[in-house]
Image (cartoon, rainbow, N blue to C red):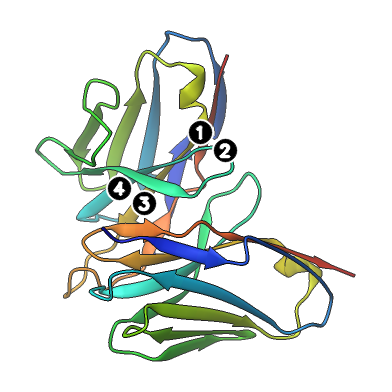
Amino acid sequence: SAVISQKPSRDICQRGTSLTIQCQVDSQVTMMFWYRQQPGQSLTLIATANQGSEATYESGFVIDKFPISRPNLTFSTLTVSNMSPEDSSIYLCSVEEDGNLFGANVLTFGAGSRLTVL
Amino acid sequence: KQEVTQIPAALSVPEGENLVLNCSFTDSAIYNLQWFRQDPGKGLTSLLLIQSSQREQTSGRLNASLDKSSGRSTLYIAASQPGDSATYLCAVNTDKLIFGTGTRLQVFP
């Protein structure tokens, strides 16, 4: 299965600043996703990162707050903009590896990026 | 709207016990269901994937079952060990993964 590297693994940020998280995959994948896990809660999908076009955002998430880039089939970035303490979460990158049937494949996750906003 | 619930929220057992973790979902129109393990400060590790046409999957001491019609899945852990201590998440795959609330498991020696 794909191996995913996320950077940074953790960071402490000041209110009002922005931070970009990188996700690198060791193979080409069609589907890449960004999730958020707030303290004590389960994972929530932020957006699907589409190669060569704008990301598809889930309800409650907007591009101005969480701009996403997907320049190629192995790399994506998520920026958390104008951070507040409520943005303190683990952010995880996930990929669904190419297969013949959409939705039939195992999703693989990166180790996550733990952000603390003061 | 798909909702995924896991029971119990937390579980603490002595080593050696056999365990059952429960996952329920409200919409049976899923591609598959996946069980994950999450260790503190780490990402998610996929344990088992059950396709919508399957009834169960086994990997080592783990066995997961799926009853789509009733919207239920169970994860059975045989002969639990302290190394099994983690949070276990189930997720149903529609056009995206919807995660459950998780079961925090502690196995003590």
Q: Earlier in the sequence, mark 4 or mark 2?
A: 4
The residue carrying mark 2 is A39
Q: Nearer the viewer, residue B77 or B27?
A: B27
Q: Earlier in the sequence, mark 2 or mark 1?
A: 2
Q: Which residue type carries mark 2?
A: Pro
Q: Earlier in the sequence, mark 3 or mark 2?
A: 2
Q: Which percent across, then down, holds residue A39?
A: 57, 38
Count every numbered label the image shows and give the total.
4
The residue carrying mark 3 is A94
Image depth: mark 3 or mark 2 in front: 2
Q: Chain of mark 3?
A: A
Q: Earlier in the sequence, mark 4 or mark 3?
A: 4
Dots 2, 1 in contact, CB < 8 A = yes
- Looking at the image, is B109 positioned above or below residue B45? below
Dots 4, 3 in contact, CB < 8 A = yes
Q: Earlier in the sequence, mark 1 or mark 3?
A: 1
Residue at 17 percent across and 74 percent down: it is A101
Quadrant where the image shows the C terminus of chain A: top right
Q: Mark 4 to mark 3: distance in Å?
A: 5 Å
